[in-house]
């Protein structure tokens, strides 16, 4: 089976499943269910990084200090990029709202005046999904089983992310049909990224270990910087137990998938 076919299958499945599950959850579930999905996604992301992606990257013959340096640099780069995006967004909306409605109407939260617009959500998600497609293709280029594990982790991450963005779009005044259509557009970007990655990585095999390292840094950053802080807003004993249990379940899913496909 060709790497391109495997990547197309995985990215199509990842995009379709995350879109379908996000739509189903967002249409039927209550908003307070989202933190449970986020907890599970954190475990799946961290499990994929430390049980699969980094071990494979380190086993490809490149100096370990170089691989880990790329992971560190990637985390710092993602921090700076997010900081610039947040600064640009906050500055632009603050200027607009102050001139149009006055300072009393500037809230700065998603879905409220001064929060992210629908177009920003789609652009941001599309770029993120495009990168996810490249990550999946890099993993399949290294090993089909690693590609499967990586796709599973990305699906686990995409479901709560797409659900959260769907709820933000609804809260911002969009209809359910339009919000789902916008999510579908961003999901297709994963397939495009997968195809691009396959075509480019055939010419850049030596870069695969470092691309996997960047993938690891991306997943670590998403889990630690974007997802975990939201869990700390719920500090009750019951909520904490659920969070820890679901994080461990996410890690366990990756370990089980590792065993199921014959590597464990």
Image (tube, helix red, strand yellow):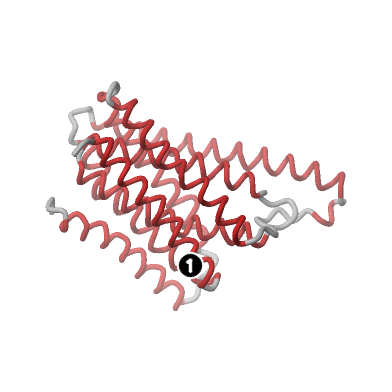
Where residue 142 sits: x, y (%)?
22, 35
Quadrant of the image for the C terminus? bottom left
Instruction: Identify residue for label 1.
Output: 25
- In the picture as drawn, the residue positioned furthest to the bottom comes out as 238
Answer few, some or many: residues within 10 Å of disc 1's Cα (few below 14, many 20 plus, some between 14 and 19): many
- Above or below for 3 versus 109: above
Drawn side of residue 187 relative to residue 3, left or right: right
Give the total of numbered labels: 1
Q: Choose top left, top right, bottom left or bottom right for residue 131.
A: top left
Drawn side of residue 253 relative to residue 126, left or right: left
- Above or below for 195 versus 235: above
Where residue 152 sits: x, y (%)?
31, 53
Where residue 138 sits: x, y (%)?
30, 35
Residue at image x 32%, y 41%? 8
Q: Nearer the viewer, residue 62 or 212?
A: 212
- Above or below for 108 versus 133: below
Residue at image x 71%, y 53%? 108
Q: Choose top left, top right, bottom left or bottom right for residue 194.
A: top left
Quadrant of the image for the N terminus? top left
Drawn side of residue 27 relative to residue 174, left or right: left
Drawn side of residue 162 relative to residue 256, left or right: right
Residue at image x 16%, y 54%? 261
Residue at image x 51%, y 72%? 28
Where residue 158 sits: x, y (%)?
43, 54
Secondary structure type for disc 1:
helix
- Above or below for 263 versus 35: above
């Amino acid at each position: 089976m060709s790497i391109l076919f495997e990547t197309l299958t995985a990215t199509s499945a990842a995009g379709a499943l995350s879109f379908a599950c996000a739509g189903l959850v967002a249409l039927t579930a209550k908003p307070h269910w989202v933190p449970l999905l986020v907890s599970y996604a954190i475990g799946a992301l961290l499990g994929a990084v430390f049980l699969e992606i980094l071990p494979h990257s380190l086993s490809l013959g490149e100096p370990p200090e170089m691989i880990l340096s790329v992971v560190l640099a990637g985390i710092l780069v993602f921090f700076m990029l997010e900081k610039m995006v947040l600064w640009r967004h906050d500055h632009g909306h603050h200027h607009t709202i102050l001139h149009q409605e006055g300072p009393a109407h500037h809230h700065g939260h998603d879905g409220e005046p001064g929060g992210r617009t629908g177009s920003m959500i789609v652009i941001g998600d599309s770029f993120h999904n495009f990168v996810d497609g490249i990550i999946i293709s890099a993993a399949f280029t290294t090993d089909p089983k690693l590609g499967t594990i990586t796709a599973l982790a990305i699906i686990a991450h995409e479901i709560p992310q797409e659900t959260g963005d769907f709820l933000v779009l609804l809260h911002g005044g969009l209809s359910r049909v339009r919000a789902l259509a916008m999510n579908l557009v961003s999901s297709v970007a994963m397939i495009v990224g997968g195809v691009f990655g396959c075509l480019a990585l055939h010419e850049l095999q030596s870069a695969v270990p470092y691309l996997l390292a960047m993938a690891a840094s991306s997943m670590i950053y998403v889990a630690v910087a974007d997802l975990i802080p939201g869990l700390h807003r719920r500090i009750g004993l019951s909520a904490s137990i659920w969070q820890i249990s679901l994080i461990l379940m996410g890690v366990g899913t990756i370990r089980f998938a590792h065993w199921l496909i014959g590597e464990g």
